[in-house]
């Protein structure tokens, strides 16, 4: 998915100016995130605008979406991707740090957050900024969510499995609790390597599901194919 452009059924992503390209993680989160009842949605670290566009496709015309991006080049490209889409009237891209971004509360916040501590993975420039937590720690992310999430609102995230416990420990300290978890394996017989999480301020029993992306024959699993069929051209 790392090419210059990426075409979906209803929109087109240009990504040559963005540190992080369209990824399976982003597509998973955009297709999976529950949107029922949400009228105001915030996408933190929008990058190419992928999540904002996927959620616009999945929601009705009265839903407004704010997409916040720190990097100026990525924010400009996300804004162009939005302008070229069918939903330009209801997505607004903001070039800003989420730590200082201010707006009316949101019913739903989504984020594909940075997760590598500084120095763990070699990377440079915009890609490093997009992938490393020195620009947005879990504490800073959750503080922003606490400030911007409406009462009864929800936060949806995708994370590497190895970083789930760190984020949940931080979330618990700030009064956020997991309500739903999907464990994702890249293929059958492979270990879980990422998780989809839904959190809220309400502590409740967590529901857990498991999903593989690729079946043993190399094709998409039925569950994954059904989840993303509204987006991928070849499904």
Image: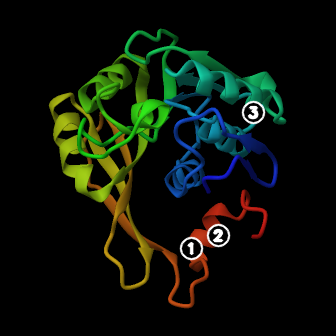
The picture places residue 48, in percent across and down from the top left corner, at 62, 36
Image disc number at residue 159: none
The picture places residue 132, in percent across and down from the top left corner, at 34, 36
> Camera-side residue: 4 or 26?
4
The quarter holding residue 217 reads: bottom right
Among the two numbered marks 1 and 3 on one chain, the one whose residue lies closer to the N terminus: 3
Which label sits in the foreground, 2 or 3?
3
Which residue is at 29% across, 55% downward? 206
Q: Which residue bears the numbered disc 3?
A: 81
Q: Which residue bears the numbered disc 2?
A: 226
> Camera-side residue: 76 or 124?
124
Image disc number at residue 223: 1
- Tell me how far mark 2 sits from mark 3, CA to CA: 25 Å
- The answer to whether the residues at label 2 and label 1 have Cβ atoms under 8 Å apart is yes
- The answer to whether the residues at label 1 and label 3 have Cβ atoms under 8 Å apart is no
Q: Is residue 89 left or right of residue 158?
A: right
- The answer to whether the residues at label 2 and label 3 have Cβ atoms under 8 Å apart is no
Neighbourhood count class around disc 1 (C-alpha, 10 Å): few under 14, some 14–19, many 20 upward: some
Which residue is at 29% across, 21% downward? 143
The quarter holding residue 59 reads: top right
- Tell me how far mark 2 sits from mark 1, CA to CA: 5 Å
């Amino acid at each position: 998915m790392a090419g210059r452009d990426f075409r979906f059924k209803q929109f087109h992503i240009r990504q040559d100016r963005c540190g992080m390209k369209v990824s399976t993680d982003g597509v998973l989160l955009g297709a999976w995130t529950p949107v029922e009842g949400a009228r105001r949605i915030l996408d933190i670290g929008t990058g190419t605008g992928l999540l904002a566009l996927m959620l616009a496709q999945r929601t009705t015309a009265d839903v407004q979406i704010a997409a916040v991006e720190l990097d100026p080049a990525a924010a400009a490209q996300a804004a162009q991707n939005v302008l070229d889409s069918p939903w330009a009237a209801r997505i607004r891209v903001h070039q800003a740090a989420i730590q200082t971004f201010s707006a009316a509360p949101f019913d739903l916040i989504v984020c594909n957050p940075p997760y590598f501590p500084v120095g763990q993975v070699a990377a440079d420039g915009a890609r490093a900024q997009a992938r490393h937590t020195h620009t947005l720690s879990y504490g800073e992310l959750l503080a922003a969510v606490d400030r911007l999430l409406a009462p009864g609102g929800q936060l949806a995230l995708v994370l590497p499995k190895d970083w789930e416990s760190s984020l949940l420990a931080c979330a618990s300290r700030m009064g956020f609790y997991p309500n739903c978890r999907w464990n994702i394996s890249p293929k059958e017989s492979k270990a879980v390597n990422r998780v989809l999480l839904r959190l809220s301020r309400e502590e409740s029993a967590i529901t857990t599901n498991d999903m593989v992306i690729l079946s043993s024959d190399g094709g998409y699993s039925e569950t994954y194919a059904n989840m993303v069929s509204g987006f991928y051209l070849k499904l």
